[in-house]
Amino acid sequence: LAVMASRKPLINRVEASPEVFDSPRLVATSKIPLRDRKGKVVGIAGFSRPLDEISGDTDLSHRFGKVIGHIHRNFGDSIDSTELAGIAGLSVSQFERRFGESFGVSPRQYLLRIRIETAARLLASTEQTVSEIALGCGFHDHAHLSKSFRKMMHVPPTRYRAAHRLQRED
C-alpha cells in the first residue's frame, strides 16, 4: 500500500515469503502503480520471485533467510540486533545497514510488523484477551500493544477485533 500512497514503483524489495507466515524463505517483490488515462493511481500490479532465482549475493540471502526464520519462530521473545547480527555472521552495523537496504525497514521495525500481524490474526481468530495476546506477541503489556497496534493499523485492537468478528459471522 506504500506504492499507492507514494505513487512510486517498488522494485525488488526483499520480503519473507507471502505464502506461509512462518516461512523463512525470502522473495524479491516488485510492485508498480496502475494508472487510469488521467494518471490517477487506481491499483497495483505486483509479483514476487524466490531469491534463489535472482542473481546477486546468495550468501547474504542465505544469511537473511536464517535471520527471518529466527524472527518468525521467536517473535514473542526479546530479540535484538546483536543476536540477529550474530545469526547473519555480520557486525551489528553491517547487519543493520544491509537489512535496511534489503527490507526497507530496520530489523526492529520488521520485528514489530511481525508482532502486529500476529496480534491482528489472534484478535480476529481467538478469544484470548488483548493482554494475553500482547504478552504472547512480545509486547510488555496491553498498553504497549495498543499503542503500537493503533499506530500501524490505524485502529485500536478492540475495534479491530470487533470489526473482524462481524466479518467472520457474515
Image: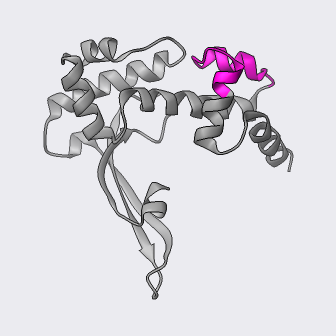
Question: Which residue is at 48% across, 79% downward?
Answer: 40
Question: Which residue is at 55% across, 27% downward?
Answer: 115
* Magenta run includes residue 110: no
Q: Residue 140 lies in what quarter of the image?
A: top right
- The answer to whether 106 appears left or right of 51 in the picture is right
Residue 29 pos. (x, y %):
35, 50
The correct choice, above or below, for 64 with respect to 16 in the image is above
* Magenta run includes residue 128: yes
Residue reaching furthest to the bottom: 37
Residue 19 pos. (x, y %):
47, 41
Question: Which residue is at 60% across, 20% downward?
Answer: 137
Q: Residue 83 lies in what quarter of the image?
A: top left
The correct choice, above or below, for 146 with respect to 162 in the image is above
- The answer to whether 24 appears left or right of 101 in the picture is right
Q: Residue 37 lies in what quarter of the image?
A: bottom left
Q: How many labels does the image show?
A: 0
Question: Which residue is at 23% across, 27% downward?
Answer: 62
**Towards the viewer: 95 or 72:** 95
User: What residue span does the magenta drawing correspond to?
Assistant: 127-145
The correct choice, above or below, for 53 with respect to 80 in the image is below
**Towards the viewer: 51 or 123:** 123
Residue reaching furthest to the left: 56
Residue 49 pos. (x, y %):
31, 49
Residue 1 pos. (x, y %):
50, 56
**Towards the viewer: 161 or 96:** 96
